[in-house]
Amino acid sequence: MKLLSLTLAALLLLSQLTPGSTQKCWNLHGRCRQKCSRKERIYVYCTNNKLCCVKPKYQPREKLWSSSSKPEAMKTQMKLPSV
């Protein structure tokens, strides 16, 4: 009886493991896969030519304009002619 319960416990634990565990990417927040799930986005490609699927909350936010990259036209204010 003990052997049967031990065998069942071992099989239960083994069934919880993912088969062929996927490679991690992007600072261990992403996983290399052939296709990303609905809640993930592609950010970079893995070394094994698969997609690095990362949840949006772990992806860096893009800065639209940093202070050093603004064009000169954006730095100066437009002056209106006075009447």
Image (cartoon, helix red, strand yellow):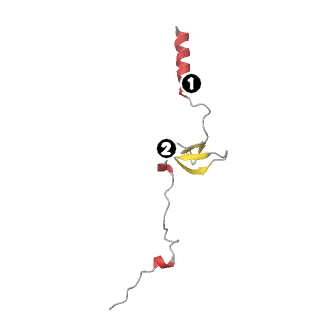
Q: Residue furthest right?
A: 48
Q: Which residue has dot 1 on it?
A: 14
Closer to the observer: label 2 or label 1?
Answer: 2
Q: Which residue ends up furthest to the left in the rendered image?
A: 83
Question: Residue at 51% across / 52% down in the picture?
Answer: 59
In the image, is 27 to the left or to the right of 76? right
Mark number displayed over residue 82: none
Look at label 2 and name its amino acid: Arg
Residue at x-position 58% and y-position 47% = 52
Is residue 53 or residue 35 the one in the foreground? 35
- The residue singled out by tag 2 in the image is 38
Q: Is residue 41 left or right of residue 46?
A: left
Distance, label 2 to label 1, CA atoms, is 27 Å
On the rendered image, what quadrant is the C terminus found in? bottom left
Q: Residue at the far bottom: name it.
A: 83
Amino acid of disc 1: Leu
State the SS at label 2.
loop
Q: In this view, does 31 lie above or below 16?
A: below
Q: Where is residue 71 in the image (x, y as percent from the top left)?
A: 51, 75
Callout 1: few (<14), some (14-19), or many (20+) C-alpha neighbours within 10 Å? few
* Kind of element beneath mark 1: helix
Give the image location of residue 81, x and y in percent.
37, 89
- The image position of residue 63, as x and y in percent, is 49, 63
Looking at the image, is mark 2 or mark 1 earlier in the sequence?
A: 1
Q: Residue at left 63%, top 45%?
A: 50
Q: Please identify the residue farthest to the top as the structure is shown.
A: 1
Label 2: few (<14), some (14–19) or many (≥20) C-alpha neighbours in 10 Å:
few
The image quadrant that residue 18 belongs to is: top right
Question: Residue sitting at 51 percent across and 55 percent down?
Answer: 60
